Structure formats: C-alpha cells, structure tokens
Amino acid sequence: MDASMVPRVPHKVGVVGYGRLGQSLVSRLLAQGSELGLELVFVWNRDPGRMAGSVPPALQLEDLTTLEERHPDLVVEVAHPKIIHESGVQILRHANLLVGSPSALADQTTERQLLEASNHWGHTVFVARGALWGCEDISRLDAAGGLQSLRVTMATHPDGFRLEGPLAAAHSSGPRTVLYEGPVRGLCPLAPRNSNTMAAAALAAPSLGFDRVIGVLVADLSLTDMHVVDVELTGPQGPQAAALPCTPTERTQPSLALSLAPLLLQPSGTAYWAAVSFPPDLGSASAEFPPLPLLSP
C-alpha cells in the first residue's frame, strides 16, 4: 500500500489552563486539529466550572494527576507558573511538555527537576516564547559568543500588571514609572504573569541566563490598550569585535489577554499553535531546554 494512503495516527494533545488563551487554543484544536493530525484528549482548569458549556464533558479532566489515562503525546501549559512548579515533573513522566509560563524556570529547583525528569522519562520540554520575537537570532548570536548583554523592557498600563510580593504595593509616581530593573531571575517571582517574555529571552541566551539578562518593567499611563516590548542586545566591543555594538528592537501589540490570544493563534502559526504542530524529533529526550525555533511566527 502507498504510504500516503496509510491513515496517520493523530498526536494527542492535552491543555492545562482554560483562561482566554487556553480557550482560544482549545477552540482551534476542536475546529482544526483533525486536519493537522492533532487530537485534543483533555482540558484541565483549576476551576472546572469555567469549562462548563464550552468543553465537551468527555474532554474535561477533573484531576490533573490522572492525565496518564488520556495518553497524551504533548501537554500544553497555559495556566500559571505554579502549575509547572507543582506538576511539571509529573507531566513529563507521561508526555512532552510545552511550558507556556517560562517564568517558572527562573526557580532553579524547578529547572533542575524538569531537566532530570526529561532525561529520565525520555520526554522533551519546549518553551513558549510569547511576545519575544527574534529569539532565534538571539540564540544564534549567543551560541557564537557574540552576545555581551541582553536587556528586555516591557511597558504597559498599570492595570495590565498582576504583581506579587513587594511589587504588589508599587504605585506609579508619574506618567511613566520603572517598577523593576534588574536580573530577570529576581523579577519572575514578583511578576510571574508579566515576565514570560523576559524569561524566554533568558532561556534563548543561556550564556547570560536568568541572572545576567536584565528585565525592566515599566508602568506607562499612556499605554491603555497595548504593551511595548523593547529588546536591546549588545555585542563585543573593540576593533576585532563583530559589528553589533548595540541593536535595539521594539514590538508593540495589544496588552489585554482578550485581544492578545487571537493574535498568538493566527493560522500563520505563532507561539502555542505552532508548538502543537510537533517537530520531527518529538518524543526524544533533551539534555537541556531546546532553543525556540518551532515557536516563531
């Protein structure tokens, strides 16, 4: 029989988190998954009531610890860093994992445990890059030894932040206020939902990592319906250095999750939708978190 005539076994996908982004992803999987060889096998949300009326009851997973009963090939986390802290290792025991909250990996214990589980169980960890564009270039430059510093600034209206710890009490002192400036590792636990772009940058540039990539969080009263991400890379200095003294880039896009989710899931393929298309080596163990090429727009 012609190989093209052999029915393709669909890859089974589970989704953890049913906020606005999770809802968009689930909707796409239900509508288009079969034509792409993807089968949605479960959806889990901390508040199961949120799935009522929109997720078929047979797909609703009540207890995340029973996910192995659905035999997923890939679990996509679009919930909160706490899910990666609490359940990342258990997920990797049964499936590949797409981390949609890379700020979770700023915790060194979590990072180490995921790497160990990935190697032990033969499943791969993928990382969503979120609003970070050009991460492939960052990775290539870093691998070539041409990246001296990396600085990521994210600015949005104060109402767009969900801050914790000392930053939760921070107030804007003017039209534009810097709430945090320092290593990304220190920012992630204070702004777990607002630091994922910076965390992706730290993972894309392992020679700098969470301790040397600088994150800047800015409250800007003029940005009522968008957020602006600035990425500044600095290369080696001196006459023998590569021609990259300082390269700033800027990206502006809607800030509200309601408008951001459709943007991330356009048919052309961006972060989460592209991820579930499965790279050729899906299922192989990784000794380290891979770069993020399959998640690019």
Image (cartoon, grey):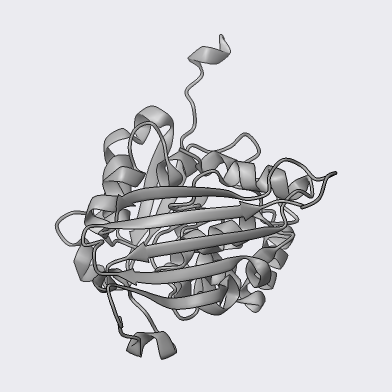
Task: Tell me: 177 left or right of 97.
Answer: left
Position of residue 34 measured from the top left corner of the image (x, y, whole percent)? 36, 32
Residue 1's x, y, as percent? 56, 9
Q: Residue at x 43, y 71 (%)?
A: 217
Q: Where's residue 193, x and y in %?
A: 40, 69
Q: Nearer the viewer, residue 149 or 73?
A: 149
List the single residue furthest toward the right: 240
Q: Is residue 134 above or below residue 99?
A: above
User: Left or right: where does residue 110 sit relative to residue 142?
Assistant: left
Residue, far left: 53
Q: Residue at x 26, y 45 (%)?
A: 27
Position above or below: 192 against 156: below
Quadrant including the C terminus: top left
Does residue 59 show up? no
Pick out the residue farthest to the front: 239
Residue drawn where x is 66% and y is 38% of the image: 281
Taking depth in this image into account, of 70 and 224 the one nearest to the observer is 224
**Depth check: 131 or 48 in front?**
131
Residue 95 drawn above or below residue 240: below
Which residue appears at 68% of the width and 44% of the height? Answer: 244
Report whether 74 appears left or right of 158.
right
Quadrant position of residue 118:
bottom right
